[in-house]
Amino acid sequence: MDLLNVMIQEKPVVIFSKSSCCMSHSIKSLIRGFGANPTVYELDRIPNGQQIERALVQLGFRQSVPAVFIGQRLVGNERQVMSLHVQNQLVPLLIQAGAIWI
């Protein structure tokens, strides 16, 4: 978890992803569509990707990606992000984190 904390520190939106994951791509597109510029870590393309993936699984992820942090808080996977979006809570969360301005 310490590694994850370092990676999400001082970043409004962080997405842990894999380059081949279609759900990760959809979540990145959704968040970018609101004008946010998330920090994206492609776990299959970085040297310590497997270590990060294990840390995400320890947090309770069955499948490690996408894993979304907004305002240094774990939001969850694509289901939780889409649920926030449908409930009109995603944009306020992005604003609160300083990821977008209105």
Image (cartoon, grey):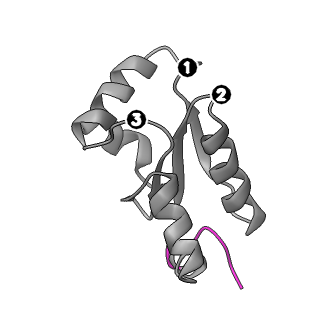
| Residue farthest to the top, as pictured | 47
Q: Main secondary structure of the magenta part?
A: loop
Tell me the kind of residue under disc 3.
Answer: Gln
Q: Which residue is mark 2?
A: 19
- In the rendered image, residue 19, in percent from the top left (x then y), is placed at 65, 27
Instruction: From the viewer's perspective, tell me whether residue 21 is left or right of residue 70.
Output: right
- Among the two numbered marks 3 and 1 on one chain, the one whose residue lies closer to the N terminus: 1
**Mark 1 = which residue?**
44
- The verdict on residue 48 being magenta is no
- Tell me where residue 76 appears, x and y as whole percent: 40, 55
Within-10-Å neighbours for mark 3: few <14, some 14–19, many 20+: few
Q: Mark 1 and 2 residues: CB-CB less than 8 Å, in contact?
A: yes
Q: Residue at x 45, y 21 (%)?
A: 49
Magenta residues, start to end: 96-102
Quarter of the C terminus within the rendering? bottom right
Camera-nearest residue between 4 and 59: 59
Q: How would you rate the neighbour count of disc 2 (Cα within 10 Å): few for under 14, some for 14-19, many for 20 or more?
A: few
List x then y, in percent, for residue 47: 49, 14
Query: Answer yes or no: do the residues labelled 3 and 1 have beta carbons within 8 Å?
Result: no
Q: Nearer the viewer, mark 3 or mark 1?
A: 3
Q: Which residue is mark 3?
A: 63
Drawn side of residue 70 relative to residue 56, left or right: right
